[in-house]
Image (cartoon, rainbow, N blue to C red):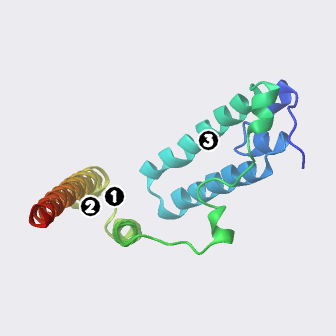
Amino acid sequence: MMKKKKNRFWLFILSLWPGAGHMYMGFMKMGLSFTLGFMILLMIVGITNIGAFAVLPITLYIYSFFHANNLGGLDDESFMAVEDEYLFGLGSLKNQPVKIDQKVRKAAAVVLIVVGIYMLWNVLFELLRSFFGWDNPVIRAVYYFMRDDVPRAVIGIAIICFGVILLRGKRAVTEEMDGNQSQQVIQIEQKDDEEASAK
């Protein structure tokens, strides 16, 4: 499908659904990426039943809306220069196998474990609440503790771990640079010694 600037009114209306405005202008790959991304994030929110995750589809929705309208507002030359490509790494799936770094794999595993535990807790708590009743003070205290305090604690721990990882990474880079500099100094000294002995 050819890229083509279209009526701004219909672009505005269609961009109210993520990806539809892009498809209307001929950016089919972009449009598909936004639609799939939005639907997957909605599915994650629905399955996990974790309200905090709702920020993800809302953010993607807003970004998609403004991205489509900004594309429609470009001049003709800039508009035609924009390439239609898959977003969020979807284009690399068909070209080459996806390589996941070990650190990313571990982080993803931790996130999945935490989300799985939280989902399991929601299911178990519903059973407890139906058995003991909502008027039980212990049940209510446990509910509010799990709803308010545990997510804050998990996010706090995650932020601390992320900071420690950043510090370790920076220290490793610094040590590597120091090692390279000392190796260069040794090489220069050896070269000077060779030149001196040659004379």
Classed neighbour count for the residue bearing mark 3: other residues with Cα under 10 Å, few (<14), some (14–19), many (≥20):
many
Which residue lies at the image location 10% right of the left edge and 61% below the top edge?
Answer: 196
Up/down of 116 relative to 30, above or below = below
Locate residue 67, reporting x and y percent: 66, 35
Which numbered mark, 2 or 3, is in the foreground of this view? 3
Locate residue 97, reporting x and y percent: 59, 75
Locate residue 106, reporting x and y percent: 34, 71
Q: In terms of sequence position, does the residue under pointer 1 or pointer 3 come before the other?
A: 3
In the rendered image, which residue does mark 3 sit on?
A: 61
Quick one: which residue is furthest to the front in this view? 199
Residue 134's disc is 1
- Secondary structure of the residue carrying numbered label 3: helix
Q: Nearer the viewer, residue 97 or 156?
A: 97
The three-letter amino acid code for the residue at tag 1 is Trp
Quick one: which residue is furthest to the bottom in this view? 97
Rendered image quadrant of residue 82:
top right
Which residue lies at the image location 28% right of the left edge and 49% below the top edge?
Answer: 148
